[in-house]
Image (spheres, rainbow, N blue to C red):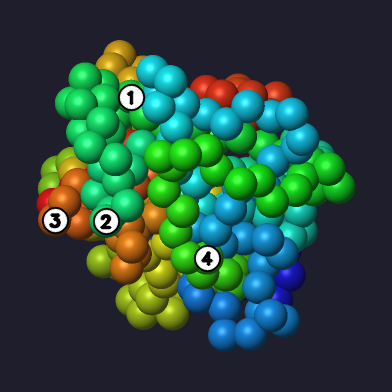
Amino acid sequence: MDPESTLSALRDFSAERLGPELAARFVRLARPGFALTEAEGPGETAGHSRFGGRAMLEPGTPWPTCDGFPLSLIAVLDTDALAPWLGDVLPAGTGLLNFFFLDTESEQHDPVSYDLMYKYGHYEVEVSSVIAARSAHAVETSPPVRSSVFDPVPWAATPGFAFPDTWDPAWNGFDVGPDADDMARAMPGDYVENRLTEWSQRPGALDSEDIAFGWPQFPTGSSPMVPFGKDPTHYHHLLQLSSHDEWAIGGDGGWMHWAIPTDALRTGDFGQAVPTPDIW
């Protein structure tokens, strides 16, 4: 279905189980997103979207570094291929988003990366970068020496609507209605999900460990993390990435998220994107 029809079906599904008023408040939290899975054939690939491979940059774009040490290309999202579902989430013509991170976990990593990660930590912008490139101008770019290159895994992108994780601050102040008890008011996300029978069957449900846009999910039960003192509700999710064969986050595995201030997203200032890891 197209996004409008899917959202309409989601409203009907929620209203039957929650009642019209609570359903309307709930559906307002829905954000368009994509479940990213390995494409089974070239026809399923969402444009240039993929894990690993080489960066897609405009000629002359500097390769991102941390204290002069090169970051590694982790993933590419082709927003032109995703645009029909995203509406006005992104500025027109955003093109390709290249996600870079300091590689400290793969077999290819350079020992210097450990020192840099110890200096900055997984949550700092210095160890990460998101660079946009116009699709018509972007070319595959060879990485500098000491940067890891992972085998590319093309992605298929299944569109749908995502909701905040149970512990996400987006639920703060959510009105669960006059009949709800104190526990429901303390954990509105849990309350709503428990009342939505067949939760996984809701229209536009996203089921994947790798997610583009939408809302971040934190499987370890931690809360979303953004720069200290910043309001998480003023950020928009870009990418949730699980560990892959060649790359992992945090040694024992986990998930890496990239988020960006909503105002910066509207203007296409991806230099303000921040990494938010969720580590076991």
Going from N to C along the chain, the mark reached first, 4 or 3, is 4
Q: Provide the secondary structure element on which disc 3 rests.
A: loop
> What residue type is disc 1 on?
Glu
Quadrant position of residue 124 = top left
Front-most of 42 and 268? Answer: 42
Q: CA distance from mark 1 to mark 2?
A: 23 Å
Residue 102 image position (x, y, % from top left): 36, 37
Left or right: 32 as drawn, with respect to 128: right
- Which element is circle 2 on? loop
- Compare marks 3 and 1 and give the one earlier in the sequence: 1
In the rendered image, which residue does mark 4 sit on? 152
How far apart are the alpha carbons under marks 4 and 3? Answer: 22 Å
Instruction: Tell me the tag on residue 252.
Output: 3
Label 3 – label 1 distance at C-alpha = 20 Å
Q: From the viewer's perspective, is residue 223 above or below residue 121?
A: below
Q: Given this view, does label 4 or label 3 mark the residue nearer the observer?
A: 4
User: What label sits on residue 180 in the rendered view?
Assistant: none
Residue 208 versus residue 118 in the image, above or below: below
Three-letter code, disc 3? Asp
Give the amino acid type for the residue marked by disc 4 in the picture: Pro
Q: Decide which of tag 4 and tag 1 comes sooner along the chain.
A: 1
Q: Residue furthest top?
A: 229
Disc 1 target residue: 124
Q: Nearer the viewer, mark 2 or mark 4?
A: 2
